[in-house]
Image: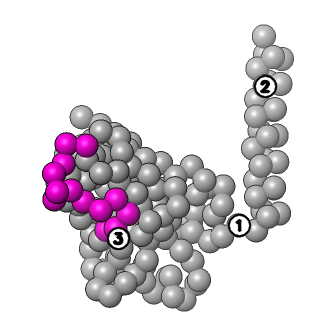
């Protein structure tokens, strides 16, 4: 069994320089997991931050489960992320010192059926950086097209 992607944040690589990737578990309720299995997750506007006693995923939207009863979950509640204590200490120090942010890149089920979040340690891009990235991507696409037609 391979990992199955639930939601992906495609804008993250456009808006940020991703320096390092981390994998974290996420504390969910039963109806949230059922909703994710049905494809009801969105992490476009979300981010991870340290609050109170741990690392939390903020602004992630998991749709209410259709067959849930009055005990259904709240769609946009903060959800705690689970990582080793050493990793959490290291990340907190990096975030405070370097002025970086933690952006969720994808939400997926791993091989064991557990929901995981792939986080990226990110630094924001300026407008000219975004244009430069887009220019390089367009040039690489054009270059591959030219090589493909010339290769016959």
Mark 3 against mark 2, which lies toward the viewer? 3
Please name whichever residue, 150 or 97, is drawn nearer the observer in this view of the structure.
97
Could you tell me which secondary element the residue under label 2 belongs to? helix
Q: Residue beneath label 3, please?
A: 78
Please name whichever residue, 24 or 73, is drawn nearer the observer in this view of the structure.
73
Residue 73 on the magenta segment? yes
Q: The magenta stretch spans which residues?
A: 66-79
Left or right relative to 139: residue 117: left
Residue plotted at (47% across, 48% down) = 8
Label 1 vs 2, first from the N-terminus: 1
Mark 1 against mark 3, which lies toward the viewer? 3
- Residue 19 drawn above or below residue 12: below
Our reading of the magenta stretch's main secondary structure is loop
Q: Residue beneath label 1, please?
A: 125
Label 1 vs 3, first from the N-terminus: 3
Q: Residue beneath label 2, please?
A: 145
Other-residue count near label 1 (Cα within 10 Å), few / some / many at <14 / 14–19 / ≥20: some
Could you tell me which secondary element the residue under label 3 belongs to? loop
Residue 101 appearing in the image: yes
**Quarter containing the N terminus:** top left
Other-residue count near label 3 (Cα within 10 Å), few / some / many at <14 / 14–19 / ≥20: some
Q: Residue 31, percent across and down?
A: 20, 52
Residue plotted at (76% across, 20% down) = 148
Mark 1 against mark 2, which lies toward the viewer? 1
Left or right relative to 93: residue 117: left
Residue reaching furthest top? Answer: 152
Q: Residue 76, percent across and down?
A: 38, 63
Left or right relative to 90: residue 112: left
Marks 1 and 3 close (CB-CB < 8 Å): no
Q: CA distance from mark 1 to mark 2?
A: 28 Å
Please name whichever residue, 152 or 74, is drawn nearer the observer in this view of the structure.
74
């Amino acid at each position: 069994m391979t990992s199955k992607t639930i939601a992906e944040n495609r804008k993250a690589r456009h808006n940020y320089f991703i320096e390092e990737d981390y994998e974290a578990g996420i504390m969910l309720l039963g109806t949230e997991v059922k909703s994710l299995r049905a494809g009801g997750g969105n992490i476009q506007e979300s981010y991870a931050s340290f609050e109170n006693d741990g690392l939390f995923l903020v602004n992630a939207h998991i749709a209410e489960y259709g067959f849930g009863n009055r005990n259904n979950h709240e769609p946009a509640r903060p959800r705690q992320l689970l990582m080793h204590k050493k990793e959490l200490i290291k990340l907190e120090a990096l975030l405070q010192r370097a002025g970086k942010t933690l952006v969720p890149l994808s939400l997926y089920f791993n091989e064991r059926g557990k929901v995981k979040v792939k986080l990226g340690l990110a630094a924001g891009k300026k407008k000219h950086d975004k244009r430069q990235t887009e220019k390089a991507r367009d040039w690489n696409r054009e270059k591959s097209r030219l090589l493909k037609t010339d290769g016959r």
